[in-house]
Structure formats: structure tokens, C-alpha cells
Amino acid sequence: MLFFSRLRFQTKIVLGISLIMVLMAVSIAVPVSRIATRATITESRERGKVLAENLALQLVDSMLTLDFLRIKTMIDELRGTGDDIDYAFVLDAAGNVLAHTFEKGFPVELLAANSPEGPGAHIHQLDTGSGLIYDFAVPVVIADKRLGTVRLGLSLSRVRAEIRRLNLTLAGLFSAVLVVALALSSMFARRVTRRINLLKQYALEVVADNPSSKGASILAKSCWEIMHCGLSQCPAYGQPRLRCWQMPGTLCPNCAPVDSLGQKSCASCPVYLVNAGDEIQDLAEAFDYMTESLERREKQHEQDEEQLLYRALHDSLTGLANRALCLDRIAQANERAARKPESTFSVVFIDVDRFKVINDSLGHEAGDQVLREVAKRLLTCARRVDTVCRYGGDEFILVLEDVNPRETLRTVNRVRASLRNPMTIDTQWIHVEASYGIVYAPQQNCLPEDLLRNASIALHRAKLSGRDRIVAYRKGMHEAAIQTLGLQSDMRRGLDVNEFYMVYQPIFSLENNRLAGFEALIRWNHPLRGIVGPSEFIPMAEDTGFIYELGYFALNQACTDMVGLLLDLPAEDRLTISVNLSPRQLSRQGLADQIEQTLIATGLPPSALVLEITESSLMKYPEASAHILAKLKEKGVGIAIDDFGTGYSSMSALQKLPLDRLKVDMSFVSRINGSSQDREIVQAIITLAHSLNFKTVAEGIETEEQREALRDMRCDLGQGYLCARPMLLADVPQIIRQMVCAQGLPRAGPGVI
């Protein structure tokens, strides 16, 4: 205190104001640093947990379908979303690693030692030697069945580095505030000191001139409030707004009475009260400014917290609610339904059909614009009480509150109609369609994750049924999905242990009943379910991508089985072998080279192979199909359209395709004698084929009347139960020896359908 009392007045002001501002800065910086530190750590933990849980939800379908490539792609994409993600890997129920992003040298044994047990998410803090990490483990569960586990590592050292950067930033701001405080207080102190010194000088002069006056005594006590300017020198000082020190209603010693406002001044009065509010007002305004600044900072801090919370719960691209907020809204709806049984709601899972085509053709920026436009249209169709969220990628979710099934379907149809309206993206007109999976809630003992899973199952059914469809979840779909998962696993195992085999159905000439070739058909002898028909496992293989392995097996096995039998025949009796290609096989790059390598490896002449492709798959992308078929045709193989008449082929499209055969669908053949309309359709197909120099093949001939009718229409070839059912390879030599369609041909053997 003694030291402070000896300081100059100006220095006291500088130190006092600086100390006040420093204390204020410290009182703000320390809590802000602590809050920011806690928020950063909490945000990192919550972010890691949300990422792991969301990845677990996304992986349900992929693990159901055992799509390992999709699983690897998803964790690679997640790994690339942030520098703080050290690793991500997926385990199956047995603990086997399905996919991972470990870098070389990572201590994997440390994770094995900290493997979680029990349901729910687990968080561990691990020391890898190179730094600390948060390890998040979330089970992938469907219907209380654990499919596997997702493990995600989040770097704690990067979190601490972020905290250090934040503290350094606060320290920098603190230093800047201190420098500014010293500068401002110094400027303020110099100004105040100059005025006060001037006022003190005036005070001495006033006291010397009139020591007994009341004004002198007042001036002695508060010398900075008065000013002496001499008897007639006020204008020389240029001081505005002078007031007489006398109170209103009293007499000034040397002038007339003061008016009621106390504003009247006189040139002969030696003492005047100065309007010293300038300096006081400056000081008050400075403190008001500091108060307003603190309020602004506090308000900005609250806004920043609100912004962080908003970003944590909303999608950055569309502004819709994200998965975390969606699950929270479903949980709230579940709780309301538990309290009020009459309160019902629905969850609608929406997936934009063929969105990948938009990204591949127009670019990801155009894809983002499409997603934003879809989000706007969903918001337009929803009510204020409903929740619209973007679940991820091209998937959206509607949580419809207080609705019954009829109102839900009305809303979904409104969304469907809105999305069908074309949208303009970068001068391009784009038509968007979507598939919809609906689950009506509440459902007994169903968590939010279970409702989303059921809606996803219904969405998957909608996609399988042809796109742009609406499917509501029904009891038994979940069990069917589990059964499908088991069947998918069995397919891969069955191919490894030779449970799949080929059967061959003869194809005859309708003109002379002579054998013309065979169609190769794949069958599956399941160890528990027996013979599984292709109508059950082919769509599943097509959906999961297993059709590539299965299709290659069928092609290679058919060529291997038939090469010896066909090559032993005379040149004039050479037969053909027809093999079916799926749409996914047709669209895969390198198909022509694969077929050529198979022909070379087996020794089958290219002219003996006929590839059958369904009409619907060709007409979906006719120009691309024509390009692929031209490459196959260059290899010397024949091309046939299967199930002709069930699609929407045009004459111009058929002319562009390098075809050899049209196969009339068996649905027309079965009604050829009972329906004149079907008879005319078959006749038109045969006439069209002959005009384009194509051969025609009739499928499903079961009666002699059907064969005679087709022969009269000049159909070239036929196949069906009338001549022979599909047969095992061991029965093929017998029919080759006969070479004709006649009674007594081999029927279906054991295990043949």
C-alpha cells in the first residue's frame, strides 16, 4: 500500500484499470478453458460412440448379406472422415476379423486383451505406446442375435492437442486483452491527468482570489468540478456549458438571480461550476462498453454452444436431423406411446433408387444437389410435428407422429408423387424415384433400433420387388431375413463342398423332332432342405453379388460336362449348349474375356455355346447391352433372348442387338390352344424373329397339341416336359444316341426338378 500510495496518479489509473481488465479476462478465460476442455473431451467421446453405433446400424444389412466388399468400403469411408480415427474393424460372431483398417505395427494384441463382454456399447482408454486412444466397441445385433462387433479407435492424443491449441488461443487472446488494456488505460490516464492538473491550477487561483466564498470551500473539496477563468476571460478558454455554482433561486454575489434551471451565467462572476460530465461520461461509457462487450461474448458463447449442439444433431448437407436425433425422436415417440396406448406413430425408411447412376454420370456435386432437393420435398410433405432425417448416403427417414396406417400411406404417397416430379440440376432434368419401407408403431418390446431395422427389412423387400415400391413390415419378415442370412452363408459353403450341380434339358427341332442341343440349368442339393429351386436362391445370389461366382461355376461346369459329348458327334449333328447369364453378370467388366478363357480352358468350340439373357435386363439399358453383346458375338458365341414377350422390346432395339434366337416365354405357350389372343402373340413373335433372321425357341411344351400348333406357326425349336425333363449328366448320352424327341426318353432322376 505504501508503494502504491507513492505512485503517480496517472500510473495508479493505468495499473488500476489494467488490473480490473486482467481480472475480468482471467475470470472469463479460466471457466471458458475448463468448459471448452470438457466439451472437447465429451464431444470426442460422443462422436466416437455415435460413429461406432451408426456404423453398426449400417452394417446390419451388409452382414446379413455377407457383403464383405461393402463392409470394407464402409469402414474405409469412415476411416477417411477424420484424422482422429486411428482404426476401424469388424468382427463376426465368432470373433473373426471381417474387415479392418489397421496400419503396420499397430498392437492388435492390446485390443484382444480389452475385448468387451456383454451387450451395449463399451468404451476403453488404451495406451498403444505411440499415444492414448478411446476404443469404442459396439455389437451388431438383429433380433437379439449378435452378428458381430464393430471396433473403432479414436486418438486421444489428437484430442489433447486440440485442447492445447485451444488453451494457447485463449492465452493469446488474454495477452492481446492485456496489451489493449494497458494502451487504452494509458491514453485515458494521460487525458484525465491533464484535465485534473488544469483543474487543480484553477482551484488554487480561485481560492487565492476569494478564500472565504462558499465556492472556494466547495472547490477545495472537489477541485475537479470547478473552473476559474478570470473576470472577463471565459471566451478565451472556449469552455462550453458553464453553470453558476449557486443553487436555483439564490443570488450570485456579483450577478442577477439565477434562473430556475440554474443555467444562467454572468461575465463578472469569478467562479463557475463546469459541466465536468465530459470526463465522467467518457469513463461511464468506457465501463458501459466493457459491460456490453462481456454480454456480447457471453451471448456469443451461448450461440457457439447452440451451434455445436445443432451440428451434432443435424446433417451438414441437408440441415435435416441426423441419425442420433432420429433415434432420440423415435425413443420419445415410444415413451409417449407407452404412457398413452392410443398414441401411435410410424417410421418410414426411404432410399433413392439408382442414386449411384446420378453420381457416376453427373458428379457428386450434382448428387448433393439432388439430396438437398429431396430433403426440401420431404419437409414440404411432412407436418411440423413429424421428423425428417437423413440417415446416411441416399437414405432418409420419416417419423410420423399420431398417425394410423391409412394416414401413413397417404403421406408416403404424397412424398412419392412429389419425388416423381422432375427436378432441374445444372440445366439437367432428373427424374427421381424411391423405395419405401414402413413400420407401424408401437410394437411390443421394440427399441428405436429395432424399429429402424424392421423398416430397413421392409425397404429391402420393396427394392427386391422392383423399385419405386411401398412395403409395410409384417410379422415374420425378420425371421425370414434371419433365414435368408443363413441361406446366404449356406450358398457360399455349398459351392465349396460341391452341393451345386448342373442338369440339362434337351432342345429339339419342331420340324423333324431331332435333337438340337441342351439348356444347362443349375440346382442346389441342400443338406437339410433338400433340393432348392433356382427361383429361391438365384435372386438372393443376384442381390448379394454371389451370382458372379455361381454364374462362373455354371458356365465352366456346363462347358466341361458337354465338351466331350458334343465333340464326338459328326459335324452335321453338332449340338449347342445354352447357359443363362444374369443381369449383374452382363454388366460386369471383362465378361467377354472370361467366357473366352473358359472356352479355351475347356476346349468347347465357341459356336457350340449359346448365352441366354432375359429380355427385361437387355431392355433396361439397350445401348450398353448392344455394346456388350457385340463383344460376345465377336468371340463366336450365340446370343438368345430368354422369356421374350414379357418385357418391352421395340423393333429398333432388337435391330441393334446381335441376336441369334428369341425364346418364347412358357406363359404364352401354355395358353396357346386355349386363348386366341396368346396364339396371336406367339405368331407375331415368330414372324418378327424370322423377319430379323432369328431362330425361335418355344419353352414349356407339355402337350402334343402345343407342339403341333407351334410347328404350324413355323417355330424352329422347342423344349419342355413333352420330350424330356431336365436330366443329370449321366442320362445325357442316352438321349444323344436317340437324337429324336420320342416316348421313352429319360425322365427326371432323383434330386432333379
Image (cartoon, rainbow, N blue to C red):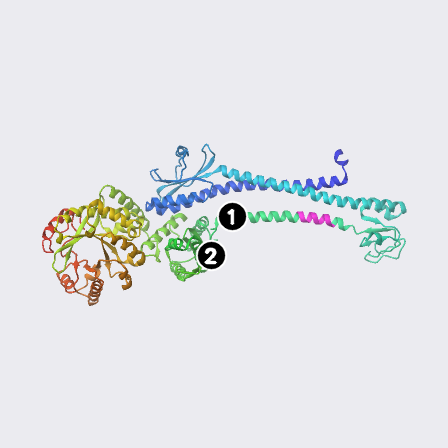
Residue at the disc numbered 2 = 385
Q: How far apart are the alpha carbons under marks 1 and 2? A: 21 Å
The quarter of the picture where residue 513 lies is bottom left
Q: Is tag 1's residue or tag 2's residue first in the polypeptide sequence?
A: 1
Q: Is residue 139 left or right of residue 186?
A: left
Magenta stretch: includes residue 283: yes
From this viewpoint, is residue 210 visible? no
Residue at the disc numbered 1 = 309
Indicate the amino acid at tag 2.
Val
Q: Is residue 204 left or right of residue 447?
A: right
> For numbered disc 2, what is the local secondary structure?
loop
Q: Residue 2: where, in percent of width, then height?
A: 76, 33
Magenta stretch: includes residue 178: no
> For numbered disc 1, what is the local secondary structure?
helix
The magenta span reads 281-290
Q: Is residue 509 above or below residue 545?
A: below
Q: Which residue corresponds to the image point at 40% horizontal and 43% vertical from the top-left?
A: 75
Q: Is residue 195 left or right of residue 544?
A: right
Q: Residue 708: where, in percent of width, then height?
A: 13, 63
Q: Nearer the viewer, mark 1 or mark 2?
A: 1
